[in-house]
Amino acid sequence: MPRQILRFFLFLFLASVSNSVATSYQLIDLGLLDYENSDFSCINNKGLICGSFNNGHSKNALVCNVKGSINYTNINFSTMPIINDKGVIFGSCQIEMGYSFWSHPQEVIFKWSQPLSYFTNLRIKNLGFPAALKNERVVVISANDDGYVLLMNEPLVEEYDNISFDYQIWLYVNGIFNKIEHPKLLVARKINNQAQILGAFFERTNDYYKIIPSIYDVATKKICTLDFPSLAYGIDINDKGQVVGIFKDPLKNCYYGFFRDYSNKEYITIENFQPIAVNNPGVIIGKFMEGSKKNKPAIWSRGALQDLNDLIPGLIDNKGHIWQSLDKLIDINDAGYIIGRGKYNGKRHGFLLSPMR
């Protein structure tokens, strides 16, 4: 058989493996160093995981990897940090500005380079804040591999439950805070490595506001909207421009998950599933929305929806401990590693799910 054909079949095999759901997962406890609580916000494609821990006195940022190495900082981050594939962490925290009587607390952006390095304090840099947001919040929402940091003046609540019409969106690029003002981008959720920002805007319809997902291209400053029959929430976008979220069917008066390419009006409908994150191979993690499995963690790939509890025998972790529950999935990387939080021994712990194919 010619080499070209062999390579073709090998490519198909590898693609099918990378795009498939694991047959089972190893549950790994990330309740690190006996801290009171631990929580995680992001896992990159190098296996670095960032989040925070609570030592009983303060909540500080930490980073670890799938092999168990860990480092942390004594900076009390005010929002959960974000890590990109270059291993750089961005987050926000409060510091005191000014002097003596004239000092005031100000939220600023921090960059933590080489977070597993021994010289932690030398790797943390204060990036400042938009001048227009003095004495206001400045929250890191997302960051990409080129160091583009997406900011807002308020944290974005899940599903826009508390819609504010005073959101301000900023993009930090090469030392400059650029304000993004567009009538079809009133909130922002994620920036990918193509510098596409997933967000939304609101339209008044009868007695409520319809939420419409939108994607803003930073390079061209063009925007496209993702139209649905009723309100919809765009939750995550990968580097291929594929978006996941939920939408409401006004005829059946119920919600569905969706998986959609931003450039295509067609979309895949996923029943009884709310997506939380999607990786570049197109595997989606989320939760069931109704029925006996409501709010239980779930995973979708290539048309198949599975209960993650069924893929973790006995909810037994790598130390032999039995967990009470897996409460929330948070992120998935391209290799299929999943982070989330659950409950073990009455305390909230972060966990890692390592795929076993």
Image (cartoon, rainbow, N blue to C red):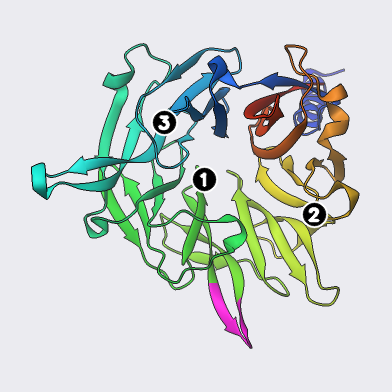
Identify whether 23 is placed above or below 183: above
Label 3: which residue?
A: 58
Q: Nearer the viewer, residue 277 or 157?
A: 157
User: In the picture, residue 344 is in which quadrant?
Assistant: top right
Whether 70 is among the magenta residues is no
**Residue 83 image point, x, y percent:** 47, 33
Q: Between residues 62 and 278, which one lies in front from this camera angle?
A: 62
- Of the residues tagged 1 and 2, which is closer to the observer? 2
Q: Is residue 207 magenta?
A: yes
Q: Secondary structure at mark 2?
A: loop
Residue 192: image tag: 1
Q: On the rendered image, what quadrant is the C terminus found in?
A: top right
Q: Residues within 10 Å of mark 1 (few under 14, many from 20)?
A: many
- Which quadrant of the figure has residue 7? top right
Task: Tell me the CA gap for discs 2 and 3.
Answer: 34 Å
Left of 220 or right of it: where is 275? Answer: right
Residue type for callout 1:
Asn
Q: Residue at x 86, y 47 (%)?
A: 293
Please state which amino acid type lies under the numbered disc 3. Answer: Ser
Helix, strand or loop status at disc 1: loop
Q: Which residue is mark 2?
A: 289
Inspect this view and state whether residue 107 appears. Answer: yes
x%, y% of residue 166? 40, 69
Q: Residue at x 10, y 47 (%)?
A: 101
Extent of the magenta region: 202-209
